[in-house]
Image (cartoon, rainbow, N blue to C red):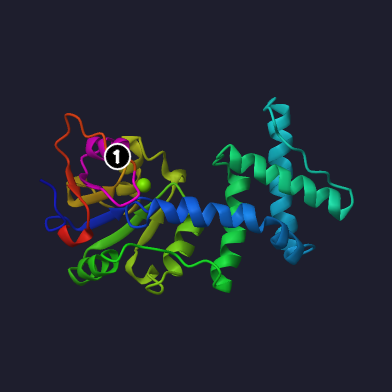
Amino acid sequence: MASSTNCDTVILDIEGTITPITFVKDILFPYVTNGLDAFLDRSWGTTELNDHIQLLREQAEKDVTAGLSGAILIPLESSKEDIKSAVKQNIEWQMAADRKIGALKSFQGLMWRSGYESGELIGVVFDDVVPALKKWQSEGKKIYIYSSGSVPAQKLLVGYTEQGDLRKYFSGYFDTSVGLKVEAQSYLNIAQEIGIKDTNTILFVTDNINEIRAADQAGIKVIIADRPGNAPLDLANSTYKVVTSFDSL
Ligand SMILES: [Mg+2]
């Protein structure tokens, strides 16, 4: 059975592992859709917003060219109201479709940063997470994050939590630019990036059984996090260790 005692490196998933899924689903994503109008008004005319709108505009042109149904173009030269309305519809459409495309992620990241910095958003981690991070750090283990949320979004979530800035515990962050979380190669890529040859010295904790299988295939030790609010686990024929709290890691 895997445990954190015989490994030098711990890689953690965020959603459903260190953070309740409800925070992401009920707080983080609705923050973008509900606050879009006010955010656009507040930031209108700034270079940063213009740059992000331009990314959305270029993506929308690609989407239309690709024949994607529902794609919403953003005019370049038009009234503020027309451009704003198109941006809103574009974001709402992309978020309803749960797209994970760069332009949308960047825009969400921009809004989240403003929310965290203003104190409107506060990252949530389970109570047993910080004690575990402290313990691992004191044991000299390196701790990383691997999440499908973008690296900037990961840093915001752990940087502005109820328990303070947790970035001091993490040696690095990985998102899907290193590969999909359900592919074994992604874990080998991470091991290579952090300079570890023996993947058996790495422990990966996540709530997702497909990610567990991929990491396991890469020779990494794995433990499943079963947290309140997670979907029921389908553990048929699996012998993976499951924990409900980081106290038992
Ligand atoms: Mg997860």
- Is 229 in the magenta? yes
- Give the residue at the far top of this rendering: 67
Expressed as whole percent of the image width and height from the top left, the position of residue 26 reads 49, 53
Viewport quadrant of the N terminus = top left
Expressed as whole percent of the image width and height from the top left, the position of residue 151 reads 47, 55
Asked if residue 210 lies left or right of residue 197, the reply is right
Q: Secondary structure at mark 1?
A: loop
User: Which residue is painted at 75% across and 57% down in the image?
Assistant: 50
Which of the pair 43/217 is nearer the observer?
43
Magenta span of residues = 209-230
- Would you place residue 89 above or below residue 131 in this image? above
Expressed as whole percent of the image width and height from the top left, the position of residue 83 reads 82, 49
User: Which residue is painted at 78% across and 43% down in the image?
Assistant: 74
- Would you place residue 78 above or below residue 9 in this image? above
Q: In terms of image quadrants, where is residue 20?
A: bottom left
Q: Give the residue number, with chain letter if any, for mark 1.
A: 232
Q: Residues within 10 Å of mark 1 (few under 14, many from 20)?
A: few
Amino acid, disc 1: Pro
Asked if residue 231 lies left or right of residue 29, the reply is left
Expressed as whole percent of the image width and height from the top left, the position of residue 49 reads 72, 59
